[in-house]
Amino acid sequence: MKILAIEASTEALSAALFDSAQPDGTAEVFEIAPRAHAQRLLPAAQQLLDQAGLGLADLDGLAFARGPGAFTGLRIAAGLVQGLAAGAGLPVVGISTLAVVAARALDQIPEAGRVQVVQDARMGEIYTATFARADLPVSDDVERVMAPADLEVATGSDTIRAGNGWALVVESQALAEQTVYVEAPHAADVARLAWPMLRDGQGRPAAEALPVYVRDDVARKPGGSR
């Protein structure tokens, strides 16, 4: 099964080409490119297809990081995947950005059983959820947005931390520095998490490739009503 995956939830962007026959050989283009997602994502995806000698018709599905994350990046990724999937008649899977970060962190630390992910939501807030290794990509709790001072920091011995928002938690709660294993999501992990879902027929039509913002009102002031 061949899957093209797109990720644009943060200042980083990435595209990955996954083949279930060689799951450890996933090809990925990854860049830190603020405000360049619209210009760079499609060329990155095309580069991977060209290098593999494949076209969209050779794929079995598309996957993308559905959020939460930067509103503009999420819309760009969803729009790109919608267009490609509609044109090629391919199924789509959206994966939580927080789960994508969690998966990479748990890969790095085999002895960890859970990971608490905290991503910078801007406007003085964070996105957060906790994931158990056995349940990925499903979260232990609801993805939510909150002030970093309100986060209940997990203290279990088998729980690690990941995400680019931990510095906000450390500062707001006057904590000791925390060991954070992964900050940026990667499209390679989007594809890896999407594979079992596409394999099991859980792909959705192109029109259902929609972002999940968690915080819907980007224009509100921090501390305002949700």
Image (tube, helix red, strand yellow):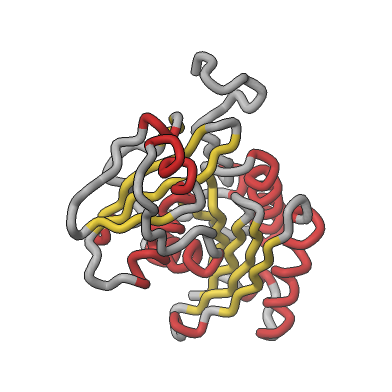
Q: Position of residue 5 (x, y in %)?
A: 58, 64
Q: Is residue 52 visible?
A: yes
Q: Position of residue 129 (x, y in %)?
A: 36, 43
Q: Is residue 21 left or right of residue 133?
A: right
Nearer to the camera, 3 or 48: 48
The relative height of residue 40 versus residue 19 in the rendered view (above or below) is: above
Q: Is residue 18 left or right of residue 80?
A: left
Q: Residue at x 53, y 75 (%)?
A: 18
Q: Residue at x 63, y 54 (%)?
A: 8
Q: Position of residue 156 (x, y in %)?
A: 18, 52
Q: Based on the displayed image, in which of its 4 quarters is residue 216 positioned?
A: top right
Most extreme residue toward the left is 157
Nearer to the camera, 124 or 58: 124
Question: What count of labels does the image hold?
Answer: 0
Nearer to the camera, 95 or 197: 95
Q: Residue at x 65, y 73 (%)?
A: 29
Most extreme residue toward the top is 225
Q: Residue at x 25, y 45 (%)?
A: 154
Q: Is residue 94 visible?
A: no
Q: Based on the displayed image, in which of its 4 quarters is residue 69 positioned?
A: top right
The relative height of residue 222 versus residue 45 in the rendered view (above or below) is: above
The relative height of residue 6 versus residue 21 in the rendered view (above or below) is: above
Q: Position of residue 104 (x, y in %)?
A: 42, 66
Q: Is residue 43 left or right of residue 122?
A: right
